[in-house]
Image (cartoon, rainbow, N blue to C red):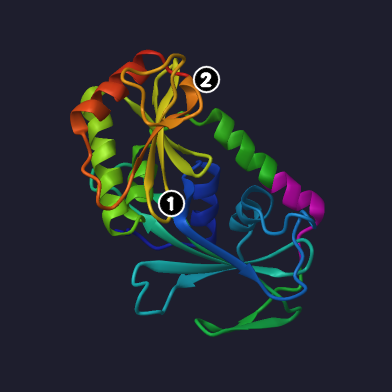
Amino acid sequence: MSTSGTLSVQRVEEFVLANRVIRAPDYRKSHDEGVQFTDLDRGLQWGADVVPALQGLFRVERDPRDDRPDGWVGFARHWRGATLQVEFDEFSDPSGSDAVLVVTGVFGRAGTETITDKTVGEVALPEQVPTEGEWRDRRKRYEAARRSDDTDGATAVRAYVAALPGWKRDVATRFDEIVGQNVPDVRRAVRYHQPFYGVEGEGWFASFSAFSKHVKLSFVSDSYLEPRPPAGSGPERQALDVTETDTLDEERVGSWVRQAAAHPGMGW
């Protein structure tokens, strides 16, 4: 990933409220024993815990590890008393579009005065802990920003693709190119933690997601495509699973893209 500028607590919050934060495909999460999160049953959640934490970091610094030359690490107190350690990169597209923050990992840390991290050493914790109401208000601000967002999500999609490993990145890159070639005015966005493609004002017609052994190219239409993709359970869930050894039939995929874009199956 390419990075630009210097990140600060305020800058990270600006990313969140501009809806310019995504979760990396290999996003990792864990927590120390006894750490509790907003939802006591479900544990650490993106919307309930990570997003509010990014709006309330008390420390941000470069990740000193050699294998993360472009990485950053931030710390935020959680309203239940723990500390969230968030790792992220700032992705800047060569086109000059607005940068995107890519979160690669979140870790819940126990401690009341300090925590000791093997990466950055001892971290002194502020005494002030946000209230549950303040935490909830942060989430509401983010949700409002998402509802009112009208920015082009091309950079977010490219950041997601750049974070994929090896052959999966190659497949995703080519699919993104095929979509762009067949639908020149395509609208891109990262929704539900995966890239989506849509027609402005009409709806979303395609997406993709990466799994351990394949990349799933999905088509969302209000009618079946011709010929029907080999996977899926209905017009709105038609798909092609691409493995490392598969050769992508670009002509057929392009045809599916055009058909789906003519009849998007997911509302705007």
* Residue 96 in view here: no
Residue with the mark numbered 1: 211
Residue 62 picture location, percent across and down: 43, 72
Mark closer to the observer (1, 2)? 1
Amino acid at circle 2: Gly
As for residue 131 lying within the magenta part, the answer is yes
Of marks 1 and 2, which one's residue comes earlier in the chain? 1
As for residue 3 lying within the magenta part, the answer is no
Q: Which residue is at 36% across, 56% downward?
A: 163
Amino acid at circle 1: Phe
Q: Which residue is at 28% across, 53% downward?
A: 244
Q: Is residue 74 left or right of residue 167?
A: right
Q: Which residues are magenta?
A: 129-138
Q: Which residue is at 31% across, 20% downward?
A: 227
Residue 266 picture location, percent across and down: 50, 22
Q: Main secondary structure of the magenta part?
A: helix
Q: Is residue 220 above or below residue 72?
A: above
Residue 250 picture location, percent across and down: 20, 33
Label drawn at residue 267: 2
- Indicate the secondary structure of the residue bearing disc 2: loop
